[in-house]
Image (cartoon, helix red, strand yellow):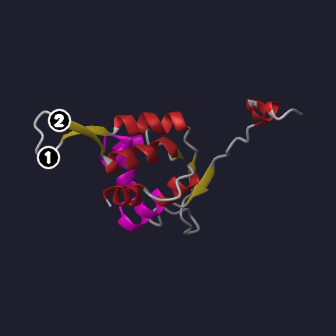
């Protein structure tokens, strides 16, 4: 096999879905946390989510000059929703049961413990190849 042919799509390893117990407050009949099914994002999907979460903020002291800024909370919630296969966060009946109307609101209601939510965010980010979380990247960019 030539060196070039190794780069063909047929040779690309496909990342499989995984599971994660996102919260201890949703349990099965044995008292074990329910496993959520997580799929990997593609680079294109991530870019679309990131673009959707960008806002323009005015540069301090420079009227009419704006710079892009990532709304990190919105980005994280949308990223989580794009990765969760099960439960179906887009299911209207599930949303209604929590009194919310969007998948992003639903994931925050279902995982309402801040520590569990952060653990889930970290797991999904690591699963998608991000070695640090978005807050670390923001802090690093500030310094």
Side of 107 where 100 appears, left or right? left
Image quadrant in which you'd find residue 135: bottom left
Residue found 53% across the figure and 64% down from its top: 33
Image quadrant in which you'd find residue 15: top right
Q: Is residue 46 above or below residue 35?
A: above
Q: Is residue 123 above or below residue 51?
A: below
Q: Residues within 10 Å of mark 2 (few under 14, many from 20)?
A: few
Residue found 51% across the figure and 44% down from its top: 83
Q: Is residue 94 above or below residue 136?
A: above
Furthest-right residue in this view: 1
Q: Is residue 21 above or below residue 85?
A: below
Q: Which residue is mark 1?
A: 60
Q: Which residue is mark 2?
A: 65
- Is residue 97 in sight in this rendering? no
Where residue 84 appears, x then y in whole percent? 51, 46
Side of 132 where 58 appears, left or right? left
Residue found 77% across the figure and 31% down from its top: 10
Magenta residues (range): 92-121
Of 102 and 114, the residue lying toward us: 114
Where residue 92 appears, x then y in whole percent? 39, 37
Where is the N terminus found, in terms of image quarters?
Answer: top right
Side of 53 where 66 appears, left or right? left
Say which element carries label 2: loop
Of 102 and 34, the residue lying toward us: 102
- Verify CB contact (< 8 Å) between mark 2 and mark 1: no
Is the stretch drawn in magenta largely helix, strand or loop?
helix
């Amino acid at each position: 096999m030539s060196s070039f042919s190794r780069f063909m799509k047929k040779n690309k390893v496909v990342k499989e879905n995984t599971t994660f117990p996102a919260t201890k407050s949703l349990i099965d009949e044995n008292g074990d946390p329910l496993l959520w099914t997580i799929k990997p994002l593609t680079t294109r999907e991530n870019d679309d989510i990131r673009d959707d979460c960008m806002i323009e903020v005015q540069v301090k002291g420079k009227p009419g000059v704006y710079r892009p800024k990532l709304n990190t909370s919105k980005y994280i919630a949308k990223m989580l929703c794009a990765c969760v296969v099960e439960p179906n966060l887009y299911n209207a009946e599930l949303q209604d049961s929590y009194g919310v109307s969007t998948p992003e609101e639903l994931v925050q209601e279902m995982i309402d413990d801040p520590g569990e939510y952060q653990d889930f965010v970290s797991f999904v980010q690591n699963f998608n190849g991000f070695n640090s979380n978005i807050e670390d990247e923001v802090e690093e960019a500030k310094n």
